[in-house]
Image (cartoon, coloured by chain):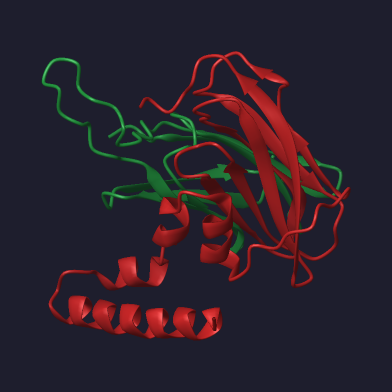
Amino acid sequence: MANSIKIRARMKGDSCEVKSLIKHQMETGLRKDKKTGKVIPAHFIQEVSCEHNGSAVLTANWGTAISTNPYLSFEFSGAKKGDTIKLSWVDNMGESDSAEADIK
Amino acid sequence: MNMKRRVFLKGTLASSAVAVAVGAGLLSPRQVLAAWPKAAFEAKSVNDAMTGIFDTDLAPASDAIKVEAPDIAENGAVVPVTIQTSLPNVESISIMAEKNQTPLIANFSMTPRTGNFVSTRIKMGQTSNVIAIVKADGKIYSARKEVKVTIGGCGG
């Protein structure tokens, strides 16, 4: 399965700026399939976390109202160019993915 | 009415139910530890969502929190929102859309290393206030901005 996470991590002064795009349907569970009339079950990312040097720099709990193909941006300190960060997610159906990126 | 006792009792019952479920193999340990705050995310009012996470629904407005969002959202399914704060020692930032069926959208747990903003895109069902709740130094503050939505984005 192709990796669902795109990360851009760049030093801006003393902070590492992270911009990420995650490919995920973020299905609310409120839509109905137009052909069958059945409700499309909710399928959405519940947890996201970003780690640097083995410690979490951001964790998030999400609900169904984060947009499809979620965008997330934030900053953190204590990193330098060449370090690696890791972004991971877990959804309500137990699926998960993670990706690493070097800080530029 | 002693709300704290109710919350304590509810917690005790919930954790013993969870223990039984884990024992029966219905819940993996990872799911137990993750503890996604279901009640808060399924709450139908801002006050109930707040109580679900913070045990209080009091969050005085603060000028030190900025809710950046468009005045008018072209598409209610993708509303860009940035919450920025100058409050020190931020522990968490939560985003809600007051008139969504379930107002709580996201809860970000910050660390001492995390910067002072989060930026994402949210779904809004109709014109509503976007509310930011920031917990800093143990205290809870809020800010809001109205976003007009012409085409609702929750799919209902």
Residue B132: x percent and y percent? 69, 47
| Chain A, colour shown | green
Residue B71 location, quadrant: top right
Can residue A8 be seen here? The reply is no
Q: Quadrant of the N terminus of chain A?
A: top left
> In screen coordinates, is A46 left or right of B20?
right
| Left or right of residue A25: residue B55 | right
Q: Position of residue B149 (x, y in %)?
A: 59, 20
Task: From this view, report whether residue A58 is shown above or below residue A9.
Answer: below
Q: How many marks?
A: 0
Q: Nearer the viewer, residue A31 or B1?
A: B1
Q: Position of residue B120 (x, y in %)?
A: 61, 36
Chain B: its colour in the image is red
Please report the residue visible at 84 percent of the width from the left and 52 percent of the height from the top.
B62
Using the image as rendered, state which of residue B27 and residue B71 is in the foreground.
Answer: B71
Q: Where on the picture, by quarter, is residue A13?
A: top right
Furthest residue toward front: B1
> Which of the 4 quarters of the picture holds residue A27?
top left
Q: Which residue: 60% across, 54% down?
A: B108
Residue B18 placement, left or right of B119 = left
Residue at the image point whose x is 29% and y is 73% from the top: B29
**Rendered-image quadrant of the C terminus of chain A:** top right
Q: Residue at x 66, y 35 (%)?
A: B129
Residue A77 pos. (x, y %): 77, 55
Q: Is residue A2 visible?
A: yes
Vertical arrangement, residue B42 with respect to residue A9, above or below: below
